[in-house]
Amino acid sequence: MKLNGWGNFPIVDSKLTSLSSFLKELSKKSDEKTETREQAKAIPRGMGRSYGDSSLSDTVVSTLQHNCILDFDSNNGVVTVESGVVLSELLEIIIPKGWFMPATPGTRYVTIGGMVASDVHGKNHHCDGSFGRHIKQLTLLTGDGEKLLCSSTDNSELFYATIGGMGLTGIILEITFSLLAIDTAYIRQESIRVKNIHEAMEVFEASEDWTYSVAWIDCIAKGDSLGRSIIMRGEHAATSELDIQQSKKPLQLTPKKKRSVPFNFPSFALNPISIKLFNNLYYRKVPAGTTKEIIDYNTFFYPLDALLNWNRIYGKAGFVQYQFVLPKETSKEVMPEILKHIADAGSGSFLAVLKLFGKEDKGLLSFPREGYTLALDFPATSATFTLLNKLDEIVHQAEGRIYLTKDSRLQARWMKSGYEHLSTFQKVRQQNDKNNLFRSLQSDRLQITSNNE
Amino acid sequence: MSPSSLLILGATSDVGRAIAHEYAKNGFDIILTGRHLEEMEKSAKDLEIRHGIKAQALYFDALDSASHQAFYDSLDNKPTGVVSVIGLLGDQEKGFDDFNHAEQIITTNYTALVSILNIIANDFKARKSGFMIGVSSVAGERGRQSNFLYGSAKAGFTAYLSGLRNEMFKHNVHVLTVNPGFINTSMTEGMDLPKALTLQPEDVAKDIYNAQQKERNICYTGWYWRWIMLIIRTIPETIFKRLGL
């Protein structure tokens, strides 16, 4: 059947199978003891929220039926789940008991297994690191058919290869991780409007003791306004900060109606004028200076989830997300340069996001490292690919790296330079997947898997 | 008064799992039964965490009818309702050549269920309360060349449920026959099913819960199946035998 990632690009023919059927097939094959090298490749997939071809392969193994919550210690804040549990479902269980995720991506519609494979980061990365930092242990089914318990002490190499490992080390079966204690389901937010990228960086660096910080950045504005932004920083609100209505049930929200984009927008809907208009309106929505408010966690963490299928606004041709990180030392100089390229191209996106990452964690292919990261989306056009090829080079020269979860078009040569632990990763993977079973279109394209024969 | 509870026969099937969640969501305690104990124990834990009810997993082998009475006697708290989701589609061609396989299909879909449901029905009768749900199939309404071993067993089961309903009515026990159409499950994985006529297990579970609560007698999951099957049943046999269904 036709499958694609969240960006609707690329779309390929794959065989979609459930995890249980896949396991049955796998055990049949090992019974036969055929020594012939299996040509077909497989990759696990959860909600399919990676943007490009990370979860595409010949055989795609859906974990969505593998979704039991196995343990929830509500006194100490530790959960064990099967990999197909969806974050939105888990939140509904842990929040009423006073717990939240230690790191969360910008959407609730991901599986916990996917969160491990992408080693997702949130707005608190500078304080709390990526999701992998909070994982106590995982169970992994390797390409060699072994079920291994992995943690920082058991099979630790495989543990750190699997965190951020894009499903290439095998299928994550179970995950145990610790949660964050909260008093309320609300966030005390400050929004600060700043005139350009330099001011934005100053505010980021002055906000390091805030738990959460992120900026929406206008990628169209040029000149003195290059990189004008709205920086949002937040803390979990205490009950005393809520209004009377909210404080009656501080851990519960009244359900909101979800909206959906009902069809693919025609290609002319997104054009330089509409994008410029949107960016202008968005920037002016927040008054100059600092605005303070109490908002619920969904509005703060998952604003785009309020619009289901928002990926349809890019039409049938789909779109690409581009996210990179630059070392802190090169950011000041190079980030404005990149923004200038994007603004000059004029094809910039509705929602571009800037954030300052904290210290790097141990995942061998994990994306976050200390420095500034920018994420933005573009329609999948040839002009976009030309622009992004140019940006790849700049990112490479500045010793940055590209986020695999968002990628659908990077060239293999930039992979090696961005991820210095790549060869270690390949070695660990090879030791546990002698038939080279777990591969994605992306991992072959980037020669993460295809060149280690 | 102890809370309502549902005994699920065949709990590891996709529909069985979905029914467990639907009833748990509505406050029922759940007894999961089947042969895959480890898997069911995980499901039981999941049901308890998600829905705040009590759930347990018990080994039950439908094909071992000699064990059925002891199994039911071993339940500390007898359920207020039972649903059978046990079924085996099997391989029509294989079963046509090999009676062992044919017998397996017939036993799993029909005679094994008669054994356990008779035992439960007698208990419900004595207690003068309870509900019984049998998940049969539209395939039981008319034998077709593609799956008539499965279909004939389901036909037997459907007739059994109809008679059971008649028998149990005077004892204040309600019997619901469920005729699902196409469902997107591991049983049908890889089949090329018409998308518009194919339901998710969760939708089926919701239909079943609603039908049981309203004490309906026969429920087609996917309302249109009632009409599709009406048409299929009315085709004259002289024509039907020539069709490639």
Image (cartoon, coloured by chain):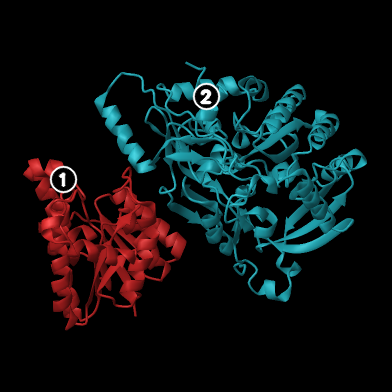
| Quadrant hosting residue A345 | top right
- Pick out the residue farthest to the right: A224
Residue located at (90% from left, 46% from top): A195
Residue located at (45% from left, 32% from top): A170
Which residue type does callout 2 highlight? Answer: Asp
Which residue type does callout 1 highlight? Answer: Gln
Instruction: Answer left or right for A151 relative to B2.
Output: right
Q: Which mark is residue A444?
A: 2
Secondary structure found at label 2: helix
Count residues near mark 2 (Cα–Cα under 10 Å), then give few for <14, some for 14-19, many for 20+: some
State the image coordinates of residue A77 (x, y, percent, origin top left): 56, 54
Looking at the image, residue B144 lies above or below residue A223: below
Q: What colour is chain A?
A: cyan
State the image coordinates of residue A267 (x, y, percent, origin top left): 65, 44
Residue A122 visible in rendering: yes
Most foreground residue, B54 or A420 = A420
Q: Are marks 2 and 1 on the same chain?
A: no
Residue B135 visible in rendering: no
State the image coordinates of residue A364 (x, y, percent, origin top left): 59, 28
Instruction: Answer left or right for A32 relative to A269.
Output: left
Label 2 vs label 1: CA separation? 41 Å
Most foreground residue, A452 or A319 = A319
| Quadrant hosting residue A9 | top right
Secondary structure found at label 1: helix
The residue singled out by tag 1 in the image is B92
Chain letter for the red colouring in the rendering: B
Q: Which mark is residue A344?
A: none
Q: Are marks 2 and 1 in contact (CB under 8 Å)?
A: no
Instruction: Answer left or right for A203 relative to A178.
Output: right
State the image coordinates of residue B25 (x, y, percent, origin top left): 42, 67
Residue located at (22% from left, 78% from top): B173
| Quadrant hosting residue B207 | bottom left
